Image (cartoon, helix red, strand yellow):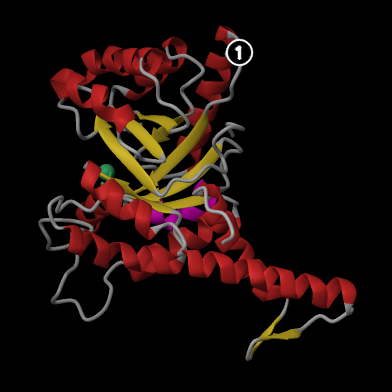
Amino acid sequence: MSERTRHLPRRACLSIPGSSEKMLAKGPNIPADMVFLDLEDSVAPKEKEAARDLVVKAINEQDWGETVLCVRVNAWDTRWTYRDVIHIVENASDRLDEIMLPKVQSAAEVVALDLLLTQIEASTGRRSRVGIEAQIETTRGLINVEEICAASTRLETIIFGPADFAASMEMPVLTGGVQIPEYPGDHFHYVFSKILMAGRANGLQVIDGPYLKIRDLEGLRDFTQRTKTLGYDGKWALHPDQVTVLNEMFTPTQEQFDRAHAILDAYRVATEDEGKGAVMFGDEMIDEASRKMAIKFVTRGERAGMAKS
Ligand code: GLV
Ligand code: MG
């Protein structure tokens, strides 16, 4: 794991095509918690090799502030992966926090990346350890998600990729990761829950992928509500307007943040001063589970820079 970024917020995770100098230059001005410079599906095959140099230049020459900075390489079933990893990690400064591996099908794919990173770090004398973000976006990846999440101590997040997943499932849709009005319920509920459980069981942040209807911000809100309510930490953004919506949605309200603090205070008094395990808080009984839930709100709020009012 990279010590700097494991616990940093990832409310909005912005995708920037690595082949676009213009978009790479704009990246640092967009207030996303995490940014990934893409060498995979947003880059045309004939641009893949040239994009590596543009990405290295953007990492080394631009000021990315505190943003979690990641590069998405191509998947292991292409011919580009090993050179992507070697070129980026050998040439990028320590400011590079993580490598994102798409279309992960098995734990072995994560182990292979971990081994390659270990060799590059040893041979270059790199000071900071590169973290890994893994995307689950195939049926086989979902079947193996529990082993994948436990495959490396470098893993920081597990991400759902709805577009490729819809393709892998052969769903009769032309846009993945948006509402399907004909389906009576949430067609991805099982997938969301399975990935969330596997990620949490291994201490990872859990992230939802892109919402492709970029101009439909109400649709984005509606779809984000699902993963946010389940407990996801953030979602991808493909446009600055999506970043604004996601930052707001994945930050607790001041009321929730203050209430969580009040629960922690009341519970501390009950357990430490009064020797009680359960106590009334207003008209509600709180206990150890309440403390754990409240801690989550406080941690998320603090990560987003909130303070008690
Ligand atoms: C993201 O990579 C997706 O396929 O949804
Ligand atoms: Mg994908």
Ligand 2 rendered quadrant: top left
Residue that sits furthest to the left in the current view:
174
58 lies above or below 292: above
How dense is the environment of label 1, judged by Cα within 10 Å: few (below 14), some, or many (20 and up)? few
State the residue at coordinates (70%, 69%). 264
**Identity of the amino acid at label 1?**
Ala
**Percent position (x, y) of residue 242?**
25, 49
**Magenta residues: mostly which secondary structure?**
helix
Can residue 208 be seen here? no
- Is residue 161 covered in magenta? no
Side of 1 relative to 112 (left or right): right
Q: Nearer the viewer, residue 287 or 264?
A: 264
What span is in magenta?
Answer: 140-148
- Is residue 142 covered in magenta? yes
Q: Quadrant of the C terminus?
A: bottom right
State the residue at coordinates (88%, 79%). 274
Can residue 284 be seen here? yes
State the residue at coordinates (55%, 25%). 115
**Percent position (x, y) of residue 107?**
50, 43
